[in-house]
Structures are given as structure tokens and as C-alpha cells.
Amino acid sequence: MADPHRLMSRLPVSLVARDPAAALRRAQRLLGSSTDPRIRSLALRISGLAVYELGSFTEARKRLTEAVRVAVQANLAEEALLARASWTGALSRYPGPSPRIPVATASTSSALWLLARGVAAYHSGRFDDALAAFTAAEPALRTASDPRLLPGLLCSRGLALIRAGRLTEAEETLLHGLALAEQYSLPRLSAMITQNLGCLATRQGDTGLAMARFAQAAPLLQTPTRYPALVLERAHALADAGMVREAWQLNLSLGKIRGCGADRALAELLSLKIAVASRAHVKVAATVDLLERLFGAESAWLRAAEQITETRGGSLPAPRAVPPPPATPHLEVAAHATPLRTAQALHHATAALQSGAAKAALRRLEQARTIDLGPHTCRNQRWAALLDRYRATFAEAWRGVSTARYKLHELEVEMAVDQWHPCCRPRDASSGQGWEDPWEALSTGLGSRALVHYSDLDQAPAALTVVDGTVRLHELAAGSTIKDAVTHFEHLAAQHVFSPGPTTARLLARRAEEVQRLLFEPIAAAIGDREMVIAPGAYTQVLPWGLLPALRGRPISVVPSGQVWLRCRQRALHSRQPPRALLVAGPGPEDAEAEVRAIARLYPRSRILVGAKARSRTVLRGLARADLAHFSAHGFARNGAPMCAGLVLADGPLLAYDVERVQHLPALVVLSSCTTGRPMPAVPSGFPLGIAASLLARGSATVVASVLRVPDVQAAAAMVRAHQALRSGVPPATVVAEHLAHLGFVCFGAG
């Protein structure tokens, strides 16, 4: 009979991790050339594992079951045990009877059997049992004749440690396993360990690093066996970062996950996160009940579900070290990359507000709402191609092609996920400026101005004012009350701009008084008649502030945080005079070309792009050389895709995403367009996203944009008067207050 050690050297199980196709070919040759039951059991086992890795669950079950049967019939106890271990490790997550082997064999102390039992325990959510089995198997595998078995155990053990919350041990284990897998040239296993390191980064609150690791692992994990877990882990990372729409779309792309293993648990936990974020309480209860029926009341998967419902209800996970913000040119990535850091800052801000510690609350709100982008621009060619595909599809939808509208949605999700590409994350991974305690700089930099922070935190609705170096806390009404009032006011304001009339005017005045009572009257005594710098919360970012009676004619600058205002102020101080102006007229708006040509007469050093010349690439090159830019074009926003907001040009849209590819941006940008000032706050920080926010984040000092739809003819005349005032030296915030605020325009950045 064949020597088992010689057989294992000819067909090692580690070959499956290195090259499953080669392992399958070699096993098939042995099956075709031998009737020896030991050889056939081994070849069936290896071929079963290989076809499993290549994605054929049914064939894997058939071959592994046959491997057990052949060994048992020949009374080969060790081979039967190894075959059963392979069956248990690979297929225990799927429903169906497992092959039986004699009791005497099953009690044999075998490292591979323990490893398989540990994998099965992991899939059922018994992480402590899994770790006990892995720990018991490890000594034997460290001294095994085939050292390539050890990194596989470390891969499984590291993942179980992550699920058990033992993150430091998990990192050490996985890095050791990765080093061994690379040493022994096991690329697929290296990819699996890299994926697990991505899971670890998600748990540590570093979404950027997690997405980079998933992208690194993806090329070798495209089989039906491995791909679902990779997609689910990526979706969990996005959901934890607040990108629930994208996570939901990734989940849908997989279809129904069946079985009762880890993939099924991850799919149901992802559905639970989405249901909690959507406040779908019936779905939440049904998903928790399903997890209990699938895995049992003692399973850690059920405890994970309970933790999701608790932490998303407002409690904070256990304190741990959080990663620094990433150095990325992508605003949406930076806003979502460190959810744990943001959650901790907002948690401490809430606690400070509830205890009346105004200065401490201000520091924490500034930390949550200050985002730095890396100094580099995005040069990823795949990313640029995606933007061009979106532009072409948008142009088709604009012309009325119905199928293009569905494609736009798919591309929006693809772009939101693809922007996490690793090439935009340098190895040092930390942003250049980082958050600094803003107190000293703010108290001196504001001068006679007043800073107002609206928290919009559900548990502590309040406003913080900074006036003459003093921080004060002002209690506000409940967030839901403010949200409803702002929504009604904004709707009437948009209606009144296009259809003014006595009835609308009366209703608008009533709504304006209500919003003013909720937001301004609590701070009025502290503010007086000072120029204001406003850092709005999530519920107040769409407000046309200049339409409130007490704020008409008052210079107002709107920013994400006081620290952002200070940086914009520094940029404005270094702006070139007279400015090199880029003036762009897009297709569609009445009098757009006349508007930019009238403005051009005010700027001798101006470049005009109208008609077919107003194309995205030409405009982006022009932005890099300009000190001032003015756009008269149709503006648009995409529901759920804030960075796909933009301006319609001759070849399609200029997107907020496009701005991230420009190294230098004009100090002042005026968007004479509808709704280009309407942001969509990122979750959970509340940091604004959109084209105006992107321009500020990438280097502009001031952006003038409307949060309402704009009537073309009125806007054109008002814009000419506004530029006349700017050329005479009037500050942008004052120009907006005097000439543009009645149309819903807001001065973002340094006023």
C-alpha cells in the first residue's frame, strides 16, 4: 500500500491554497492512475477542496463525502479523519448531512480535525469554542512535516479573534500568518489574510485602510466560494462609515445568501444595520428573530445583532485607540473614513453640552466637523474613466434616454465605492494638517464677528456662540421641531422665488418668524448686530439665512467649523488682485452667455467659455489657472449621491468629484445656478458634501451658491451688480447680503 508521507509530499493540501486549479489537475491524474484506497481518498479530498475553492459547492460535497467513504471502507482511520476534517471545515456552513466515520477514529487527537472543528464552531457563532480548538491544534501544526499548514490556522484564528473583540491579538496573529503565507508562496491564503486584516481595520474604525486591504485582496478572491464574504465585509465597512446606500446596493448585488454559516450571518447583520439606519423597526425585530432561529440564542452572531441595535441607538462602543484621518483627495472618503473617531467626538460633545461645559463642547464639535484633505489630487485612471462614463450617461439622460437614468444610479454607487482606491492613500496615511485645538486662533481671529455652532445633536440640541473670546451655550428646541420648521420654510422660500404673491409672502413670513424664533432668538442677545460665522448642523445646512427677518442685510459666512473658516480666511488674504477670471456659461439658462459677457467687462484678465467650448476638461484646466471663477449654468443635485451634484456643461456635468482632480482652485467661485449650495451631510459627522463643499475643501476661500432654485433673468442682473461690488472691494459676505441673499444665495467660507 502507498506510503502516506510520500503521497502527502506529492499532493500536499497546501497546494490548494497556492493554486487550486493545479491541485485539481494533479489529484485528477492520481484518481485516473490508481486504485489504491489511500491514494484515492487523498486525491478525492484534495480535489474536493480544490473545486470548493473554485466555486463548486455541490461537486465539493460529492468528492469529500466519497473521500470519507473510501477511507472508512478500507479501514484507513487517519485518512477517514482527514477527509471528515476537510468536509467539516469546508462545508459545515451549508445545510445537508455530514458523512459519518467510526467513533474510535473521531476521538483521535488530530490537529487538522481540531482545525476543522474550530472552523465549524466559528461559522455557528461559537467563537470561544473556535479559539479553543485553534489553540489546541496550533502546537502540532507548528511542528508538522508541512509547515504551510500553519498560516491557514493563523488566518482562521485571527478572524475568530476579531469577532471575539480581541483586536490586538488578532492583528499579531494575522500579520504572523501573512508573513508565513508570503514566505511559502501561498497567494490565495495571503489574500484571505489580507481580507481579514481589512475586517480588523473596520473594527478599529479605519474605513480607508479597510477598503484598501479589501481592494488588495480582491483579485485572488473572485470565486463563488470567497467573493461573497469579501463583498459583505466591504459592505459592512461602508455601513459602519455611514454610507448605507452603497452598502445596501452591494448587498443586493449578491442576491440571497443561503446556508447557516458566517456568510449568512454577515448578510443578515448587514441587513440589520441598514434597517436600523432606516428606522425600519419591524425589519429590525424580524432580522434579530431570524438570526436567533438560524444560530441559536447562545450564538455570538445574536450578540452582535444586539450590539448593533444598541450602538446605533446612541451608545458608544468601548473606548479604544482611533486612527488618524487619512490623507486622501476625496472629500466623501475623508468624511466617512474614521467613523469611530467621529462618534467619540460627538459622544463627548453631547456629554459636554448636557453638563453645560460650553468650551469643551465647542472643541469636540470642531473636531467632528473639521476635515483635511491630502495635498495631492486624484490621478487614478479607472476613477477618471468612471467619471467620464457618468458624464456620458448623464448627457443621455438629459436628452431623455430612459435607460440612462437607471444606469446613473448604478454608476453613482460604483463611484462611491471605487473612490476608496488605495493609490489615493499614501503609506503614511495621515492628513497633513490634522485637527488642532481651535480656541486660541478662533478667539483672536474672529475679531468683532460672532461664531455660532448649531449642534443638532438629538440628545442635546443647542447652539454655541463665540463672541469677544467668550463661549456661551444656548438651549434650543428639539431637533425634530427645528427640522420640520426649516423644511417648511425652505419649501415656501423656493416657491416664493418663482411665484411671488401676497398669499405666499404671508405664509413665508410666518414660517420665517418661526425659524427665527427657534434658531436666532435664543442667541440674539449674545450676537447683537455682529457679522456672523455660522457652522450649521445637519438640520440647518439648507437654510437661506439671508431670508430670515433679523438677518436680512447682515454679512453671514457659512462653514463646516470655525477652524475651516480660519483656513479659508488665510487663503482669501493671499488672493491675487486683480484676479484672473474664468467665466463659464453652460447650455440652457436664459441670458447665461449675456451674463458672463457682461461680467467679463469688469475683469480685464478674463477667459470666457461658452457654447461648445464650455466642456468639462477645458473648464477643469481653466480652474487651475484662475483666481476667480463664475459659472452661469444649470445646477443639479442627485438624491443620495451628494458628490454627483454639479453643473451642466456642453459635454455633460461638471461634478463635485471632478474638483478633486484639480491641484489649484480659484480663491473665489460664484455658482449662478440652482441648488448648488445645498449640501447633503455625511453620516455621522454632519460634514457637508456637494460641489460647494468640495470647492472649499480642495482650496477655494469663498464659494457663493444658492440653496434654492434660481430664476435665470433675476439672477443674471443680480450677478452683474454683485461683481461690480466685488470689484470695488466689498467683501463677499456683504455682497451676498446686499445683492443675492433674496434669491437664496449664501456665502460659504471666508466672507
Image (tube, grey):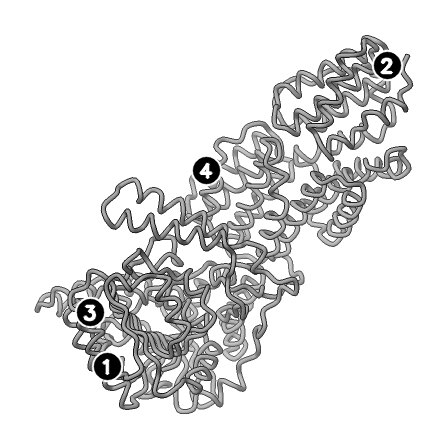
Q: Nearer the viewer, mark 2 or mark 1?
A: 1
Upstream in sequence: badge 3 or badge 2: 2
Find disc 1 in the rendering and name its residue: 722
Q: Is residue 502 left or right of residue 581?
A: left
Circles 3 and 4: CB distance less than 8 Å?
no
Is residue 371 shown above or below 379?
below
Callout 1: helix, strand or loop? helix
Question: Which quadrant of the figure has residue 339?
Answer: bottom right
The C terminus sits in image quarter: bottom left
Q: Nearer the viewer, mark 3 or mark 4?
A: 3
Is residue 718 shown above or below 275?
below
Upstream in sequence: badge 1 or badge 4: 4
Find disc 2 in the rendering and name its residue: 76
Is residue 401 shown above or below 621?
above
Circles 4 and 2: CB distance less than 8 Å?
no
Q: CA distance from mark 2 to mark 1?
A: 90 Å
In the rendered image, residue 170, in percent from the top left (x then y), is placed at 73, 49
Upstream in sequence: badge 2 or badge 1: 2
Is residue 114 shown above or below 128?
above
Q: Which amino acid type is shown beneath numbered disc 2?
A: Leu
The N terminus sits in image quarter: top right
Residue in front for this viewpoint, 599 or 173: 599
Find disc 4 in the rendering and name its residue: 252
Residue in front for this viewpoint, 265 or 470: 265
Question: Which quadrant of the figure has residue 494?
Answer: bottom left
Q: CA distance from mark 1 to mark 3?
A: 17 Å
Q: Which amino acid type is shown beneath numbered disc 3?
A: Glu
